[in-house]
Image (cartoon, helix red, strand yellow):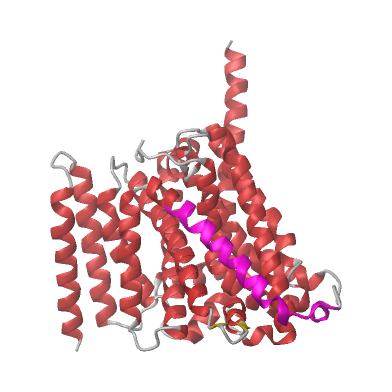
């Protein structure tokens, strides 16, 4: 089943690329780099979550970090 | 400047109103009821100073650097490296916060209205819709908010008037049974929402009438507080001690409306209006994330980032909680222990303001001495 998700995510990313790429002006190099980096990052994270579905999400990492910081403050109090 | 469009201060106030209240109006009464019991209507009044404070701090920072958003003046204040680091922290917090909001929207729609639709479809459709709105720019968002607000507010009033036959005022009594402490605890829960007013620092530079920015920001906080007070009073008059059994009491309240067997099942209208409000909320945060990223990377146009960012946020929103137990744990941490909105809405701007104040005054003294 996993490869179905992987293929559909890839198709979605390619569609996004086809839609957005011609709209970026040729002179704007930074935009192109940022666009490609973000797209590849999103694609990689999506594939990663498909293969390892139980990995923690950023929200939980933020929760964990904030809890650790507040615990440090609580012990200092 | 990266954003060419301009909005009026009134439109900014309306955007902020929806950005705070869209989820608040549903989830606040039940969440606050856990700690404040029948005094939930006092909590918004006690929590509102935090909203006023975050608007005022954003306004003060905007006074120092009138044409910059927080991403740019954090560089001026802290230097390039630490400014970039702070900006990255801010962006990560905003992205996680936005992914939680998208998840909340998807979860609520699935559980209440479309139980057989996969959540990925609901979240994906909303991401695409928001992406188009954000692609249109700030002016589009401002006009959308101006369009939705009258309908939102009118329907809110209509629902309140229609539930009035069922209310019983004595359910609110005794007022302050255990002193002020329970409502103070409830106010702490509400800080999650009021601290979100801090993201006004992304809109203040784009105002046409900048001198009115503070006024309409404050007015927005005031109207949000009043709406919350009225919502909480109506919910407690209607449900009393069973409020905690509902996930979204205001929505359940609209189910009770039945006038002469003719006007009933109004919850679908409430849902439509609620989705319009949530759409604005999600757009506001989406826009903030996109323009923040573009400014952080020193780009000249933010529109190319809208779709990749939306994809990333959609992926995070799908994955944010694996089950509702994790979600409940997250919302318990966020509302009772420490909150991410407080960090990006209040603590970071306060820190920046203190540093900016010190720098400005010391710099002034130096200039005076050399003269």
Residue B334 shows in the view: no
**Where is residue B363 shown, x and y percent of the image?**
57, 25
**Looking at the rendering, which quadrant does residue A70 occupy?**
bottom right
Which image quarter holds the N terminus of chain B?
Answer: top left
Taking the spot 27% from the left edge, 70% from the top edge, the residue there is: A45
Q: How many marks overall?
A: 0
Q: Does residue B7 belong to the magenta stretch?
A: no
Which image quarter holds the C terminus of chain B?
Answer: top right
Residue A43 shows in the view: yes
Q: Does residue B167 belong to the magenta stretch?
A: yes
Image position of B255 (left or right of B169): left
User: Quick check: B167 above or below B42?
Assistant: below
**Where is residue B319 shown, x and y percent of the image?**
36, 77
Image position of B322 (left or right of A15): right
Image position of B274 (left or right of B53): left
**Where is residue B297 shown, x and y percent of the image?**
32, 46
Camera-nearest residue between B111 and B60? B111
Q: Which residues are magenta?
A: B144-173
**Looking at the rendering, which quadrant does residue B161 occupy?**
bottom right
**Where is residue B22 shown, x and y percent of the image?**
53, 65
Camera-nearest residue between B224 and B368? B224
Residue at the extreme top: B371
Taking the spot 62% from the left edge, 21% from the top edge, the residue there is: B365
Q: Main secondary structure of the magenta part?
A: helix
Taking the spot 44% from the left edge, 44% from the top edge, the residue there is: B83
Camera-nearest residue between B149 and B296? B149
């Amino acid at each position: 089943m996993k490869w179905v998700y992987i293929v559909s995510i890839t198709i979605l990313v390619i569609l996004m690329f086809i839609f957005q790429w011609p709209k970026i002006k040729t002179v704007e190099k930074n935009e192109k780099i940022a666009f490609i980096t973000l797209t590849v990052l999103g694609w990689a994270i999506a594939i990663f979550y498909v293969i390892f579905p139980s990995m923690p999400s950023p929200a939980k990492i933020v929760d964990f970090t904030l809890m650790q910081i507040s615990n440090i403050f609580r012990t200092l109090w | 400047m990266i954003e060419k469009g301009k909005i009026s201060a009134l439109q900014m106030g309306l955007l902020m109103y929806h950005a705070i209240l869209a989820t608040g109006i549903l989830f606040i009464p039940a969440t606050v009821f856990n700690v404040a019991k029948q005094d939930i209507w006092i909590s918004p009044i006690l929590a509102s100073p935090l909203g006023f404070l975050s608007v005022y701090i954003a306004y003060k920072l905007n006074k120092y650097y009138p044409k910059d958003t927080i991403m740019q003046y954090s560089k001026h204040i802290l230097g390039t490296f630490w400014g970039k680091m702070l900006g990255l922290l801010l962006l990560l917090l905003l992205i996680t916060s936005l992914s939680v909001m998208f998840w909340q929207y998807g979860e609520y729609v699935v559980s209440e209205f479309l139980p057989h639709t996969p959540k990925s479809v609901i979240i994906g459709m909303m991401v695409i819709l928001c992406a188009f709105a954000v692609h249109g720019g700030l002016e589009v968002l401002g006009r959308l908010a101006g369009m939705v607000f009258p309908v939102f507010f009118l329907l809110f009033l209509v629902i309140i008037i229609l539930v009035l036959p069922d209310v019983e005022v004595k359910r609110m009594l005794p007022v302050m049974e255990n002193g002020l402490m329970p409502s103070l605890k409830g106010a702490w829960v509400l800080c999650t929402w009021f601290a979100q007013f801090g993201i006004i620092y992304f809109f203040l530079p784009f105002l046409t009438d900048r001198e009115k920015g503070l006024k309409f920001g404050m007015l927005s906080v005031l109207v949000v507080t009043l709406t919350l007070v009225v919502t909480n009073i109506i919910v407690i008059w209607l449900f009393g001690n069973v409020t905690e059994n509902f996930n979204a009491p205001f929505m359940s309240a609209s189910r009770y409306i039945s006038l002469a067997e003719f006007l009933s099942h109004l919850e679908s209208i409430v849902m439509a209006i609620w989705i319009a409000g949530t759409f604005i909320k999600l757009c506001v945060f989406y826009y903030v994330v996109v323009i923040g990223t573009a400014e952080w990377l020193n780009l000249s146009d933010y529109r190319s980032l809208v779709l990749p960012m939306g994809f990333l946020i959609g992926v995070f929103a799908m994955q944010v909680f694996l089950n509702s137990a994790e979600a409940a744990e997250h919302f318990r941490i966020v509302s009772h222990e420490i909150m991410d909105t407080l960090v990006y809405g209040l603590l970071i701007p306060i820190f920046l303001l203190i540093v900016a104040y010190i720098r400005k005054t010391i710099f002034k003294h130096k200039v005076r001495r050399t003269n």
